[in-house]
Amino acid sequence: MLQTYFPTMLMVMLSWVSFWIDRRAVPARITTVLTMSTIITGVSASMPQVSYVKAVDIYLWASFLFVFLSVIEYAAVNYFTTVEEMKKLKRAKNPNSYDASQAMAFDGCFHDNDIDLTPFPDVSSTPNTERNTQSRNSTVSGPTEGTRLRREHPVRQHLSFIMSNSYMIDSYSRVIFPLAYLLFNIIYWSLYA
């Protein structure tokens, strides 16, 4: 028991340490998966071969799943960080380009004071164009006919928020992973003790 469960618990806990390590430190996050694979292989070789699933197998594979999920979490954090850095790099290259997201409020509506509105070019004066010029010069209180405003979906808003703040994934994982593993241990030891 001491040679199987204790090293497995340590490897799972070691995988949690990676949530505090820099997001770009790949080897520090991957080695726990390799170590868990070695532990599983060693335990399987030392145990007698039977046709049913043993309790130790359940524990080892569940622990391996926790370690593997910590690597998947790292992949998500790394991907979101890379995407955000690429966006920042593109914004730095095109400082004069117009960013429509800056002109949008949280409710999805354009606000006139956030947009540089240029007047229409002057047209020769006819009775029909004078009426159009007067209506153009009047203040617009809302979107004109034919304007389509799209409201972002809450899932997209949350996803873009997480992508721009990828460090939050690590922050949540620091709490969620240990609590989930603790719950697994409580259930496991209550069933197989």
Image: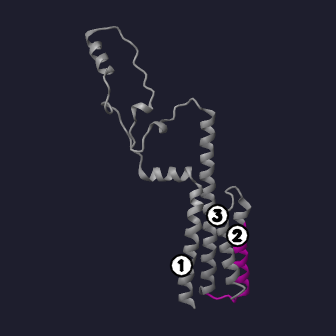
Q: Which residue is mark 1?
A: 183
Residue 67 image offset from top left, x and y in percent: 64, 70
Mark 3 crowdedness (10 Å alpha carbons): few <14, some 14-19, many ≥20? many
Residue pictured at 40% horizontal, 15% vertical: 121
Q: Is residue 27 above or below residue 117?
A: below
Disc 2 marks which amino acid? Thr
Does label 2 or label 1 sit earlier along the sequence? 2
**In 3D space, how far apart are the residues under numbered discs 1 and 3 (Cα atoms)?**
19 Å
- Mark 2 residue element: helix
Tell me if 141 is positioned left or right of 52 in this view.
left
**In 3D space, how far apart are the residues under numbered discs 2 and 1 (Cα atoms)?**
21 Å
Residue 119 image offset from top left, x and y in percent: 40, 19
Magenta region includes residue 117: no
Q: Which residues are magenta?
A: 31-51
Mark 2 crowdedness (10 Å alpha carbons): few <14, some 14-19, many ≥20? many
| Figure quadrant of the C terminus | bottom right
Q: Which residue is mark 3?
A: 19
Of tags 2 and 1, which is closer to the observer? 1
Q: Splitting the image into 4 quarters, where does residue 52 fall?
A: bottom right
Q: Splitting the image into 4 quarters, where does residue 12 fall?
A: bottom right
- Mark 1 residue element: helix
